[in-house]
Amino acid sequence: MSLSLAVPLTLPNGATLPNRLAKSALSEAMGTMDNRVTQALVRLYQRWSAGGTGLLMTGNVMIDRRFLGEPGNVVIEDERDLPLLQEWAQAGRDYDTAIWVQLNHPGKQSPKGLNRENISPSAIPFKAEMQSFFATPREMTEAEILDTIARFANAAGIVKKAGFAGVQIHGAHGYLVSQFLSPRHNVREDGWGGTPEKRRRFVLELYAAMRAQVGADFPIGIKLNSADFQRGGFTEEESLATIKALADAGIDLIEISGGTYEAPAMTGAKASTIEREAYFLTFAETVREHISTPLMVTGGFRTLAVMQAALDSGALDLIGLGRPLAIEPDAANRLLAGEEMRYRVKPIKTGIGMVDRMAIMEVSWYTRQLHRMGNGKVPKPNESGLWSFAATVVANVRGTRKTRRMRAS
Ligand SMILES: Cc1cc2nc3c(=O)[nH]c(=O)nc-3n(C[C@H](O)[C@H](O)[C@H](O)COP(=O)(O)O)c2cc1C
């Protein structure tokens, strides 16, 4: 059987990916409490690389240590950790795997108490049931906006210097870039909000600054929502216009996802969506009619037949996998050999209604599997949701305290 999954992909800048399977970013929270790369991270990426996935996108790496998304995020602000970053970048060397770094700023979407304060384009609170987890942010000043753009560019330059194969902007899931794009979260009336063009100015300037820093040959990608699935949020129409503008500006890879922590479509809330796999494929088909930039689609892919059909339809170039690779790091090798994955991704439940409705629950369960692999163990696909949730709450409370103590000293 000839598998289109196994065909290498050449990006417009000439870089080649060995196959069509890509690990989508999975936040590892495996840095030290002062946000440095650890050997566990290097080990985890060696494990995935040996598992056959052609492109490994790192979990989100922060560009400003004052604004973390979780305790234990890696931060890139300067070259103090260049040797460690070089080791991480080399983790895919033995199998020719491309490792790209996903850069992020959480904006307001950061757990209460972790940072001294949180900032966002506008001071809009979260919906009521989430306010005990996420604080209302302060509106960013123009100087802070320009500083944030410069920080993304600086971090991209360090990523290139460390030897990674590319960089990705996290423009999805309700973090800062996505907050700028959303009319619900960005109600500014200056040059950075008020119309769709002004709301996308932040991401376009961010891209231009990064490009100026890394040059024409280094791949830059973005992960973007097809929509936020929130009333008054970022729509498919605005997403398409943003994608076209980024394609015109010369971006190398666009990954399509969707949702935010307030409306977690990225992990496929509805049973019918989970059933049909490939949550965002229909939107990708529309995008494909308008641009020729390589497209990656992430969310819900589970079976070889659906992956092959999606690739063969021509709607996309790369299959993005998240949770499957957290429980089965060799999944790509099996798929490339024409076999189905060994384990099926199942909904993770604690039995506590409010907790089970939030994406945070899934994220914490899968993060624990990443930690196991980083520590040289195998994942535990049947680990209890409730146990994992309790352990994560304890770890996060400890991590938040340690992060704050570290900052105070
Ligand atoms: C533990 C965990 C951590 C995640 N961290 C990130 C992240 O850092 N950046 C990102 O863009 N998406 C992140 N995601 C979303 C995944 O990249 C992906 O979009 C989502 O899991 C849907 O794909 P899947 O159905 O193959 O899992 C995370 C998801 C999980 C489960």
Image (cartoon, rainbow, N blue to C red):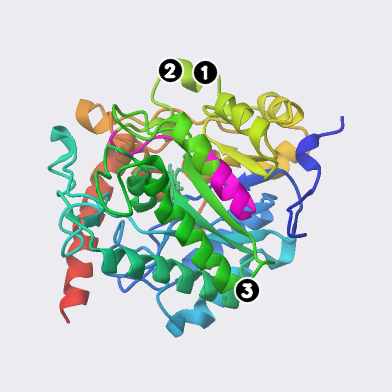
Identify the residue shown where x is 73% and y is 66%.
94
Query: Label 1 belongs to which residue?
Result: 275
Query: Furthest-right residue in view?
Result: 1
For mark 2, give the secondary structure.
Answer: helix
Residue 330 in sight from this viewpoint: no
Which residues fall within the magenta stretch? 244-262
Question: CB at mark 1 closer than 8 A to ligand 1?
Answer: no
Instruction: Say which of marks 3 and 1 sits in front.
Output: 3
Q: Residue at x 43, y 84 (%)?
A: 80
Mark 3 residue crowding within 10 angstroms, few (<14) / some (14–19) / many (20+): some
Q: Which of marks 1 and 3 precedes in the sequence?
A: 3
Q: Nearer the viewer, residue 19 or 207?
A: 207
Tag 1, which secondary structure?
helix
How many residues crowd mark 2 within 10 Å: few (<14), some (14–19), many (20+)?
few
Which quarter of the figure is the N terminus placed in? top right
- Mark 2–mark 3 distance (CA, rounded to whole Å): 41 Å
- Whether residue 7 sits left or right of residue 364 in the image: it is right
Which corner quadrant holds the C terminus?
A: bottom left
Q: Disc 1, disc 2: CB below 8 Å?
A: yes
Q: Is residue 148 above or below residue 221?
A: below
- Check contact, mark 2 vs mark 3: CB within 8 A: no
- The tag on residue 163 is 3
Q: Residue at x 54, y 59 (%)?
A: 44
Please give the residue where the numbered disc 2 appears in the rendered image.
Answer: 271
